[in-house]
Image (tube, rainbow, N blue to C red):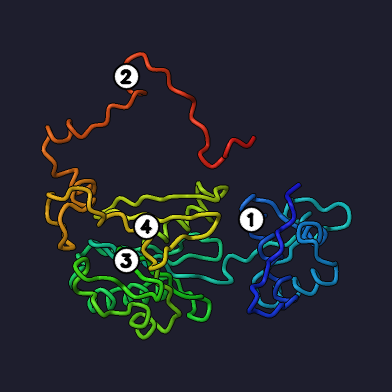
């Protein structure tokens, strides 16, 4: 039996809305059931959420009227017709959609996903972005429009746009683009895309977006502490500590690519010398001389002839069984 959905704890400065909390717990339970490919009845929801029968009934009625939840005959869904029909509930994948935008140094990608997070439209545009903020944002808005026209999804069903960008972002959501993306200095992508599309926009560093995705939907779902290293045209990291995204005082906790590792090294695109990106990014490794690669290879004890390898284990297991 699945454990009950944990209670949602309101913050000290937010009022307690029991109806909203009940809705959140029911939606979480239905989302978890969908992930496990199972279906829930109203009694199942009562057991999993700890909510009273009347509360579950009221919340489900509201969600069905809103088109977010569907109610079906479980016997009919299974091809059976004997006995009193049980009613099972599931999320309606077409109830809402979200747009994802990935802006890297050499591409723009736009994805439209349904309520289950499944892509229904996916396009990318290969182009350099560092010096052309206005053109890139215009092309991004055009791709978003293409997604709407191709799928027929009405604007009112699109919850908003999440943008991941290969640039440092401080806690106020400002791009720290000096020396990295010179054409973006002073640009506020959230405001620009909101004006071009009419949708709510949320901006996040691409490595932070990646670690959140792995923590919520990928291989790190059972991990409270995660470090995601992103090796693309540059180097970045997303860090989750004790289940929360770690940003640091200035919002730059995962910015590894421009840490100096060789004081007399090559000049980096940021203007500094010997950044990690100049020696360990995929582009730098591809351009390294063959003999340099040989010298850089780490002689790990496990690679030596006759070495015994320990069996691999789940890094998020923490020793638990």
Residue at 34% across, 52% down: 230
Q: Mark 3 or mark 2, which has the lower sequence index? A: 3
The residues bearing labels 4 and 3 have C-alpha atoms spaced at a distance of 9 Å
Tell me, for residue 168, which label it has, or none.
3
Determine crowd level at label 4: few under 14, some 14-19, many 20+ residues with C-alpha closer than 10 A.
Answer: many
- Give the quarter of the image for residue 54: bottom right
| Among numbered discs 1 and 4, the one appearing first in the sequence | 1
Residue 9 coordinates in the image, percent (x, y): 68, 68
Residue marked by disc 2: 304
Between disc 3 and disc 1, whose residue precedes?
Answer: 1
Badge 4 marks a residue whose secondary structure is loop
Q: Residue at x 31, y 54 (%)?
A: 256
Q: Nearer the viewer, residue 61 or 23?
A: 23
- Residue 200 found in image quarter: bottom left
Residues at discs 3 and 2 in contact (Cβ within 8 Å): no
Q: Is residue 3 above or below residue 55?
A: above
User: Which residue is under mark 4?
Assistant: 254
Q: CA distance from mark 1 to mark 4?
A: 33 Å
Image coordinates of residue 304 in percent, x first then y, are: 32, 19
Which of discs 3 and 1 lies nearer the camera? The answer is 3
Left or right? Give the position of 115 relative to 36: left
Please state, as top left, top right, bottom left or bottom right, where the C terminus lies in the image.
top right
Cβ atoms under marks 3 and 1 closer than 8 Å = no
Residue 84: x %, y % from top left: 88, 57
The label nearer to you, 1 versus 4, is 4
Q: CA distance from mark 3 to mark 2?
A: 40 Å
Per the rendering, the mark at residue 54 is none
Q: Which residue is mark 1?
A: 34
Mark 1–mark 2 distance (CA, rounded to whole Å): 46 Å
Residue 314 higher or lower than 93, as above or below = above
């Amino acid at each position: 039996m699945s454990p009950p959905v944990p209670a949602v704890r309101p913050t000290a400065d937010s009022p307690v809305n029991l109806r909203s909390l009940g809705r959140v717990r029911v939606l979480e339970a239905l989302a978890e059931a969908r992930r496990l490919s199972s279906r829930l009845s109203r009694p199942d929801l009562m057991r999993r959420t700890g909510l009273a029968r009347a509360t579950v009934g009221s919340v489900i009625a509201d969600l069905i009227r809103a088109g977010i939840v569907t109610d079906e005959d479980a016997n009919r869904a299974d091809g059976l017709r004997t006995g009193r029909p049980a009613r099972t509930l599931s999320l309606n994948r077409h109830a809402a959609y979200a747009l994802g935008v990935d802006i890297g140094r050499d591409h723009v990608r736009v994805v439209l996903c349904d309520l289950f997070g499944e892509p229904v439209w996916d396009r990318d545009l290969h182009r350099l972005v560092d010096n052309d903020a206005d053109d890139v944002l215009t092309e991004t808005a055009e791709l978003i429009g293409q997604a709407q026209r191709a799928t027929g999804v009405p604007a009112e069903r699109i919850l908003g746009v999440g943008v991941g960008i290969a640039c440092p972002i401080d806690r106020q959501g400002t791009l720290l683009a000096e020396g990295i993306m010179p054409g973006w200095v002073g640009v506020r992508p959230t405001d620009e895309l909101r004006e071009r599309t009419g949708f709510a926009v949320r901006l996040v560093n691409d490595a932070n977006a990646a670690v959140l995705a792995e923590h919520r939907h990928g291989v790190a779902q059972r991990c409270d502490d995660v470090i995601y290293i992103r090796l693309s045209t540059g180097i970045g990291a997303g860090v989750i500590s004790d289940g929360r995204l770690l940003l640091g005082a200035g919002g730059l906790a995962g910015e590894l690519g421009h840490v100096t590792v060789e004081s007399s090294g090559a000049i980096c695109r940021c203007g500094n010398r010997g950044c990690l990106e100049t020696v360990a990014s995929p582009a730098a490794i591809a351009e390294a001389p063959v003999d340099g690669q040989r010298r850089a290879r780490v002689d790990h004890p496990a690679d030596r002839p006759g070495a015994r390898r320990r069996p691999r284990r789940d890094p998020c297991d923490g020793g638990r069984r």
